[in-house]
Amino acid sequence: MAEKEVILTLEGLKKLEEELELSKTVKRREVAGRIKQAIDFGDISENSEYDDAKNDQAFIEGRIITLEKMLRNARIIDELEGSDVVAIGAKVRLKDVDFGEEEEYFIVGSAEADPGTNKISNESPVGKALLGQTKGSVVEVNVPAGILHYQILDIK
């Protein structure tokens, strides 16, 4: 089975590379020190510090494997300059037709999605509905709360 392609912007690629480097160097060293210190306390069979450190070590090693796999399968997308069609890498200004509110979203791959900063995944309901649409289009988005209607005001 082929591994899933991870779509990233250049910014997203740099963040994953930085997290990987930090995990491999600083975090690994910190948890190894905690394990050594816990072993120095003596009997590890009832040592909660040792158990916590080993759990943290397993988490860090798992995250390193995940990050390496994501970077191995990364496809870097360019942020688009004045495109007429919504694609991954586009900033899209929308108007909620039902409520009149305007919002701007940056369409990114799922690994980079962060709704708190208006970075939405191309795999999210809104992201999927917007892909391939043009300025002026009204799109219908099925979400758990019902159907939303957005008009595309601008694509950057």
Image (spheres, rainbow, N blue to C red):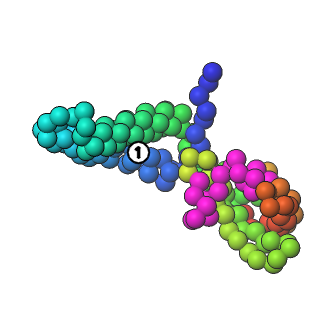
Mark 1 neighbour density, 10 Å: few (under 14) some (14–19) many (20 or more): some
Q: Residue at x 21, y 44 (%)?
A: 34
Q: Which residue is mark 1?
A: 17
Q: Is residue 155 magenta?
A: no
Residue 25, visible in the rendered structure: no
Q: Quadrant of the N terminus?
A: top right
Up-down: is 50 above or below 133?
above
25 horizontally vs 123: left or right:
left
Q: Residue at x 85, y 61 (%)?
A: 147
Up-down: is 154 above or below 68?
below
Residue 127 is drawn in which quadrant?
Answer: bottom right
Front-most of 79 and 127? 127
Q: Residue at x 48, y 33 (%)?
A: 69
| Residue stretch in magenta | 113-130
Front-most of 112 and 8? 112
User: Amino acid under label 1?
Assistant: Glu
Q: Residue furthest front?
A: 46
Q: Quadrant of the C terminus?
A: bottom right
89 horizontally vs 95: left or right:
left
